[in-house]
Image (tube, rainbow, N blue to C red):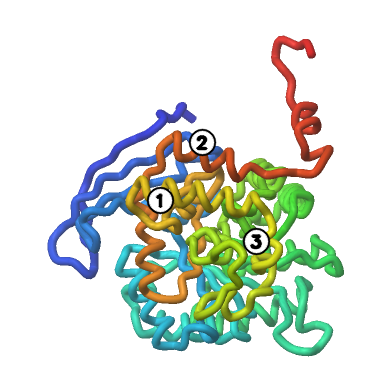
Amino acid sequence: MLPLAPALRVQGAVRHPAASGRLKLNIVIDCRSPGFYPDRLRVGCGYPHEEEEMDYRKLGPSGTVVTAYCLGTMTFGAEADEAASHKLLDDYFAWGGNFIDTADVYSAGKSEEIIGGWLKARPTEARQAIVATKGRFPMGNGPNDIGLSRRHLGQALDDSLRRLGLEQIDLYQMHAWDALTPIEETLRFLDDAVSSGKIAYYGFSNYVGWHIAKASEIAKARGYTRPVTLQPQYNLLVRDIELEIVAACQDAGMGLLPWSPLGGGWLTGKYKRDEMPTGATRLGENPNRGGESYAPRNALERTWAIIAVVEEIAKGHGVSMAQVALAWTAAQPAITSVILGARTPEQLADNLGAMKLKLSDDDMARLNEVSAPQPFDYPYGKGGINQRHRKIEGGR
């Protein structure tokens, strides 16, 4: 294989099904990121937003292409009814997005049903849509209504296909590790699902480093189809995956699909120090919600130092804080697509504006410094990091 140049430019024209005439494209293929082949394409087009460049990226090491921002649908069927959910899907695809992420457990299957109804009503968009869903969490009260066993995944996958109205799911993700099921059983099921045509690719969510390494190496050794992505929590407030999970994914050739890139709303500037959240926000409705709960983060000086730098950079660019946080995440190594959790069309429009934001080297350096992971001690602290590296010329 010939060495690749840092970037290749291609100009041409294509016909868009919803536009008259031909559209001029300017494609930039980024050949520098880790992986097997070029994995990022930025496409400028005259439809639907003339002034914007589409940022397309490969789905991990696969040949499938997705937009750099994915529409997350955890709110569908809960905080957003069918009409509101369809509006978000319409707006996202009008912008040029093509990647939808859901899960069977979201609103007990209602999220998948809403997406399935939208896909059926919009065949043109459905043809371009890349649909990802997940299985693992309880969908009933029985002992086999949960987990990554062949028994549960077989039923869960068929149910997801039915709710989505699809013959094949593009990306089927294991929603979390299952300590009770041998990894070999899960991987063989996934390989069979690819062979049968029920799924095109598979990935993981919320796995730690050794889970990724073990699964990837067993799949390789046994000749099974290998995983293409990991969906972890990742944002300026939560960067612990950089300690070994990112490296494990890069070693396995897997792309990252970060969830909660805005830290549950903290990085938008909506929450204030020592002021308990109120109103129609995630923490306003439930201040103790999960890992993003108010009290623990409010107590950390690091939280407010990061928010302050994000706010300063946002003001300097004349953009929202959310756009700065999203642009930082999208620019990190191995990122395939950033999952947006917008609850309203206004939030979605603002989030998608991050695609146009180009953070400077100084912006990135400031954000990296203030948000640097702070591991407690060895082996993830400074001493351990230093021991894992050495100078090529030797010495201490």
Q: Is residue 382 above or below residue 274?
A: above
Which numbered circle lies on residue 365? 2
Q: Position of residue 374 (x, y in %)?
A: 71, 44
Q: Position of residue 235 (x, y in %)?
A: 58, 54
For discs 1 and 2, the disc positioned in front in the rendered view: 1
Please give the name of the residue rendered at 22% of the width and 46% of the height, measured from the top-left corner. Answer: 12
Q: Tell me if residue 228 can be seen.
A: no
Please give the name of the residue rendered at 41% of the width and 76% of the height, measured from the top-left corner. Answer: 344
Q: Is residue 216 above or below residue 291?
A: above
Label 3, on which residue? 298
Q: Is residue 247 above or below residue 157?
A: above
Q: Classify the position of the C terminus by image quarter.
A: top right
Q: Earlier in the sequence, mark 2 or mark 3?
A: 3
Q: Position of residue 273 (x, y in %)?
A: 59, 62
Q: Earlier in the sequence, mark 1 or mark 2?
A: 1
Q: Is residue 106 above or below residue 42?
A: below
Q: Tell me if residue 36 can be seen.
A: yes
Which numbered circle lies on residue 386? none
Q: In this view of the protein, which residue sits in the foreground, 253 or 357?
A: 357
Label 2 Cα crowd, 10 Å radius (few <14 / some 14-19 / many 20+): few
Q: CA distance from mark 2 to mark 3?
A: 24 Å
Label 1, on which residue? 314
Amino acid type, residue under disc 2 in the picture: Ala
Residue 181's quadrant in the figure? bottom right
Q: Secondary structure at mark 3?
A: helix
For discs 3 and 1, the disc positioned in front in the rendered view: 3
Left or right for 156, reference 182: left
